[in-house]
Image (cartoon, helix red, strand yellow):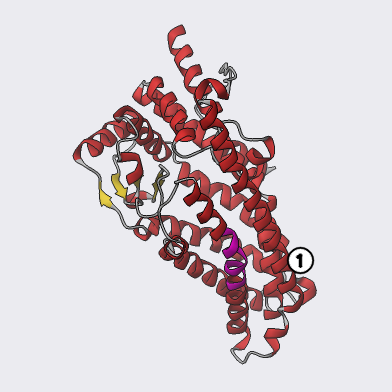
Amino acid sequence: MLWLLAAVLLWRGVVPDDLRVAGVDPASLVPAADLERAERYERFLRIDFVLSQLVLLVVLALYAWRGARFAKESAAGRIGTGMLLGMIGLALVWLSQLPFRIAEVWWDRRYEQTDAGYVESLFQNWVALGAEFLFISFALLIVMALAGRFPRRWWLGAAPAFVGLAVLFAVVAPYLFPTEPADAALRADARRYALAQGTEPMRVAVEDVSEYTEAPNAYAVGLGPTRRVVLWSTLLDGRFSEGQVRVVLAHEVAHHSRNHLLEGLGWYSLLAVPGTWLIAVATRRRGGLAQPAAVPLSLLVLVGLELVSLPLQNAVSRHMEQEADWVALATTRDPASARALFRNFSTEALADPDPPAWSRLLLDSHPSVVERVALAEAWRERERER
């Protein structure tokens, strides 16, 4: 009951429940040739994702079956051996996904979404990968230490510890990506939007991604004193009007003003407790996570839980993105630029404007282009009726 109450409170938003959102025909937004190109581009990526996850599950299942034997050959102690098995598992994960990542780069190059080479594309986010590696290492250290003391109840302490690590990661995340301060005009716009949305101004930075991709993007990152909005340089290369860039900026500021990053941590907390309990139950036949031999199985269960929870994670993300769109419309009062921006996501970033339902369920963290345009039109009609 408490879990459901917390979920309801986290779900609440500012988009009116009685909003009338009419359907939008994708053909009315994007020329037929561009529409077909976007659909073909994303179809390959969907297939690539499905195959990559199947291979990942098979590799981890084999590791869970045979990986425990490595524990007998290690002299690193209980926790050291467990962390060693965890690192081997992470290496297997990376290697199993390598062919699919190469296929993505090949496809992006073919569709002119990147000019980068294969090697630099694979290692462009090495700082973020290193941070993820450290996060998992700390998680294993905490779990095995707690499981050694509390073999059947370790998850009660591990879940809050994981949330603490997630908070720490959220705070330091802005320092993991090289950025430069945005120009004075963008900083002034962001300051004005933050005040209009009732939040303290935050830093605005630009990340130069031109060596790796042509796709546009932006994100809100950080907590408290590290809050900032980061725009990719590809948004500022002339393909998007000033009005469209302002909509993006207002949207990212809205993620901070609506506390979406904190809400994301709240959802993570709600999933961490049952998730750690399920891992504890699943590994008991291997002696529990007090024993290194259980680590390979725990990785399989963890990845399985992440895949099973994808529909919920994506639904939460789409809900937040829709709310940020609504706040951005109210802030900029420029639905025409918003509509043009969303349409450009199909022509420039090759986003399928109306993806299939299963893709929406498993892959789509944002509303579709059709849905975002429909929201902009609904906002316009609502303002006209006032």
Q: Is residue 84 left or right of residue 298?
A: left
Q: Is residue 102 visible?
A: yes
| Residue 237 lies in quadrant | top left
Residue at position x 61%, y 88% in the image = 77
Give the structural element (helix, strand or loop) at label 1. Answer: helix
Quadrant (top left/top right/bottom left/bottom right) for the N terminus? top right
* Residue 5 in the image, given as x and y percentages of width and height: 64, 39
Hey, what amino acid is under mark 1? Ala
Disc 1 target residue: 282
Question: Which residue is painted at 36% across and 33% down in the image?
Answer: 250
Residue 307 is situated, as x and y percent measured from the top left of the image, at 67, 53
* Residues rendered magenta in the picture: 91-101
Tell me: residue 260, above or below residue 133.
above
The answer, for residue 274, to whether it is visible in the render is no
Question: Closest to the observer: 346 or 162?
Answer: 346
Residue that lies at the very extreme toward the top in this rendered image = 385
Q: Is residue 87 above or below residue 185?
A: below
Instruction: Name the residue: 29% across, 30% down.
Output: 242
Q: Would you say 323 lies left or right of 87 here?
A: left
Quarter residue 273 falls in: bottom right
Q: Using the image, determine if residue 300 lies above or below residue 242.
A: below
Viewer-proximal residue, 380 or 39?
Answer: 39
Q: Position of residue 233 (x, y in %)?
A: 32, 46
Q: Position of residue 109 (x, y in %)?
A: 47, 51
Q: Depth check: 340 or 66 in front?
A: 340
Q: Residue furthest right?
A: 285
The answer to which quarter of the image holds residue 174 is bottom left
Q: Residue at x 56, y 75 (%)?
A: 141
